[in-house]
Amino acid sequence: MGFEYKVRRTRMTTKSHEIIIVGAGMAGLTAAAYLSRAGHDILLIEKNETCGGLLTSFQRDGFVFDAGPRSIENAGTVRPLLKDLEISLDLFESPVSIGIENEVIHFTSPESIHEYQSLLESIFPDNKEEITAIFSLIEKILKDMAILYGIDNPIFRDLKNIGYLFRELLPYFPKFLLAIRRINRRNDPVEDTLKKYTSNQSLINIIAQHFFKNTPTFFALGYFHVYLEYLYPRGGIGEIPLAIEQIIINWGGSILYNTEINEIIPSERKLTDIEGNTFFYENLIWCADLKYLYQHLNYQDLEEKISHKITIQEEKILAKRGGDSVFSLFLAIDEPLDTFQSISNGHFFYTPSKQGLPKSIWNNLRSIIENFDHTPKEAIIQWVEDYCEFNTYEISIPGLRDPSLVPKNKTGLIASLFFEYDLMKKVQEAGWYEEFKTNIENCILTALTNSIYPNIKDKILFHFSSTPISISNRVGSSEGAITGWSFEQPVPVVQGILNIFKSVKTPIPNVQQAGQWAYSPSGVPIAILTGLVAAKNLMKNKK
């Protein structure tokens, strides 16, 4: 099984630093890099033995797999970050393929959206007019996304540079504001938006089940632009955090691994870890799970007014849920890369059945979770079989981006699908977690071998999986969430791209927040931006 780590046992110590950053995902790494480069005394604390959070790669018997995102979206952020930090990495373009049953199209240019439209029209010939209307909306959103990501994010540029200001930023800004206004009006859940255009539930399913449940319309349908911006580093996704980690060390920053904080005492500006070690800070940037922060906050000696504000925010945070999690099946296959290259690109969204997930799937899931103790195991297994048969898979083949990631004439493949943390947790508590995990693995294999990969079952050298529980244990993410807060209820943090600078504020004295939990909707670019905003706030204070 992947995602194993060892906790290092140390003797009790006490240390003081100007700035402590908790959580070495992309937000924490970004903040630490900029602050250490500026000469600040920083300590970056990470609960695992490596940095990166979900952005990690690992090797198993010569095969390199990615534990988190299958590609990285640039979004005017990733390339500028690496350039600004003078990090040189080979970044390959990572084109996406989309497949439904036996048909596959490849996203290689903005015009590829028309191929996707034609694909849906061929599958749903009775809904051509509705599909045309849906894609008219998609094209409008794509134009706004092209504006949104039309230039590198200005946060990486010197706004005192008159040439940049007048030649690039000021001409761009009016278009940007108009695009943001239109984007903010398209905040309804994508499922609800699609229902305004068609009553064909299968058509809605096929388009919408690529995305998290209740994803805002602009964020979901805008992904057809993001697909053209995907990048993949030579060596795997984990090369990006590794490179940033190294420059932090080079610039004199300190990184403490295998260290889990379990108490935050703001009145003393003090942290304590599970070994009893204490750390004092002047300023703290919390880049880890926000629920964990408030659950481990010690209110002692805080003024009543401050405590009241913190309590209000704590109640908001703890009442909400993390977003969707995923189940991932990792396969080492005794087949050359050419076999898979003839089917798709290295990043592939595939739906085995044009029916998509029926509504009954979600009703049955709720019933199973609410009545778990009285639901026969056979009924739960049947639910999993149906779920895997009609779902959409995100498939990654690292070797198609970088052949050095697999042994010669072999292929590594990762097949993922959204999966409910609560169901996995119920099964774990009932004592049949490993059996259930094996069952899901088999159901995924059956779905793929009965459709797009008919010959792989007998070619599998080894396989293993990760679950929402694995993610929660590994990175400490509430409900095993992979991109912050659930869209199924109002989020407890800032929304709207113009509010990004407010996202890092907390009611806790001398504490900022950053990362996927600080802003919604989130992802790698938001983690980078919030980490940089928090760092710049402290750099300003020093000046």
Image: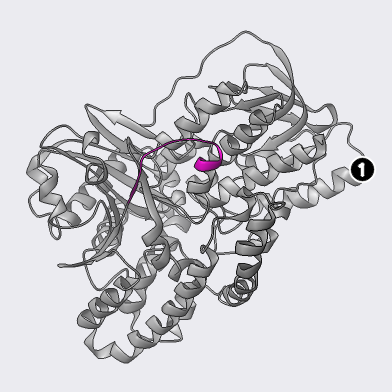
Q: Position of residue 381 (x, y in %)?
A: 28, 53
90 falls in the magenta region: yes
Quadrant position of residue 408: top left
- Report the span colored magenta: 82-93
Q: Nearer the viewer, residue 111 or 70?
A: 111
Quadrant occupied by the C terminus: top right
Left/right placement of residue 276 relative to residue 479 reads right
Q: Is residue 398 something that shows in the picture?
A: yes
The residue at the point 21 percent across, 39 percent down is 403
Residue 459 vs 444, above or below: the answer is above
Residue 158 vs 406, above or below: the answer is below
Q: Position of residue 533 (x, y in %)?
A: 68, 46
Q: Nearer the viewer, residue 60 or 525?
A: 525
The residue at the point 53 percent across, 27 percent down is 247
Q: Residues within 10 Å of mark 1 (few under 14, many from 20)?
A: few
Left/right placement of residue 343 relative to residue 43 reads left
Q: Is residue 493 something that shows in the picture?
A: no
257 falls in the magenta region: no
Residue 342 vs 30, above or below: the answer is below
Q: In the image as oriented, which residue stretches furthest toward the front?
A: 163
**Amino acid found under the numbered disc labelled 1:** Glu
The residue at the point 42 percent across, 78 percent down is 139
Quadrant position of residue 1: top left
Colouring chosen for the image of the structure:
one colour
Number of marks present in the image shown: 1
Question: Please, what secondary structure does the residue beneath circle 1 have?
Answer: helix
Q: Position of residue 21 (x, y in %)?
A: 66, 32
Left/right placement of residue 156 relative to residue 346 reads right
Left/right placement of residue 359 relative to residue 33 reads left
Q: Position of residue 535 (x, y in %)?
A: 69, 39
- Circle 1 residue: 304
